[in-house]
Image: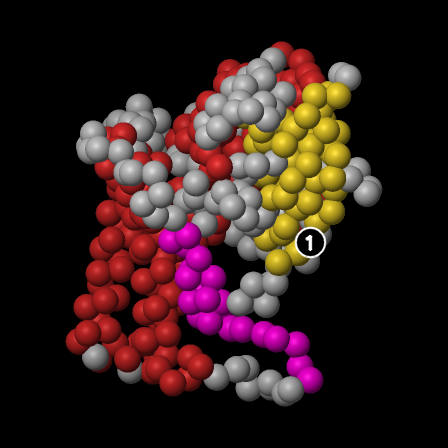
Amino acid sequence: MDFGFSEEDEGFRAEAQAWLAEHANSSTDRRTWERALGKAGWIGIGWAESGYGNRTATLTQQVVWAEEYARSSAPPRSGHIGENLLAPTLIAHGTEEQKSRFLPPVAAGAELWCQGYSEPGAGSDLAGVRTAAVREGEGYRISGQKIWTSLAHEADWCFVLARTDPDSRRHHGLGFLLVPMDQPGRIEVRPIRQLTGTSDFNEVFFDGAYARAEHVVGGEGQGWRVAMSLLGFERGVSTLAQQIGFAEELAAVVRTAVQNGAVRDPVVRSRLVRQWAELGTMRRHALRTLGGPAGPGAPSVAKLLWAGWHQRLGELAMQVRGAAATAGPEDWSPSAPYRLDASQQLFLFSRADTVYGGSDQVQRTIIAERVLGLPREPKGAL
């Protein structure tokens, strides 16, 4: 793809910069912020053909918006799961009734979503899900447990991969269900405290939670096909925005190395240059392939590249700071809340990069089997 920014794109960039400069405020609560984005037409700008988005934007303008948002001081998004994962999935597989019910509230920032995929015994091996959805009248009763569910404590809805056929195994007999989270006594959300001291992820317990039959996407037994389609939407424009954040983190590490003299160490200097070169290569590759046909291994290749890069950056941040990296803040005391500075946060959180979203081992297996055509891994080999 011949990718470049036109004069029209740069005008769109100026508009995005001006709006963000006027409205972005990190003190704004995230739900209010989502509604502000929706009211201004900044959610769903890539849904033009569906008829349910806000303003119309070309692919390059979607990139512009994502990059300018990443550069701004705007709050972290709470609606990205609904906008970037659920919405494209409904556009591809949903009925007209499902689209008309769920896409407008996402575009308005009025309903937030979370993803019910991983389970304690089915993480990277997603086909092993055991959460059950049993037909009851005009809907399903869902029982089971999901884990590592981002933003479940804020979400209004959850798309859940569950087994609708109790006699099925692996990829067969699954359903992709849209489940309301406001079911007291039927759904319990327990935050998971991480090494960073934060709780971005949650355990979610379903005890007879109800989902309507018309809220099964793609039809009963087609859950695996829909779920895999959704995972394919994790690549694309959002990858470029992610790389803007990576660039800012790398710049902070470089500044620290210059300020404390670590940059004079040839090993550190070599690692800094390598991180910079690899990030530039990832960006150019993402721009070149954006909008083009994606091979079966494209998302796995992208995940391997950025996860390893980001994890190495966290390690480099610690190396640059030396012994100071192990110390707490200057005003630390035993009674003070647990706090980390930016580089410590980067190091600890990035340890999970090669695990969540499909571990490196699983990504390599996908590439080996689906791209290179190598023999399938024997069951029970992991």
Residue 175 lies, in percent from the top left, at: 58, 24
Residue in the picture at 54% in, 19% down = 221
In the displayed structure, 143 sits above or below 191; it is above
Q: Quadrant of residue 104?
A: top right
Residue type at mark 1? Arg
Q: Residue at x 38, y 53 (%)?
A: 354
Q: Quadrant of the N terminus?
A: top left
268 horizontally vs 80: left or right: left
What segment is highlighted magenta in the picture?
335-355
The residue lying at 35 percent from left, 27 percent from top is 291
Q: Which residue is mark 1?
A: 190
Q: Is residue 242 visible?
A: yes
In the rendered image of this protein, does residue 260 appear above or below residue 340? below
* Residue 38, position as x, y percentages in the image: 65, 34
Element under disc 1? strand
Question: In this view, which residue lies farthest toward the right?
Answer: 184
Judge whether 269 appears above or below 72 on screen.
below
Which scheme is used to colour this image of the protein?
Answer: secondary structure
Disc tally is 1
| Front one among 130 and 44 | 130
Q: Is residue 262 located in the magenta-colored stretch of the structure?
A: no
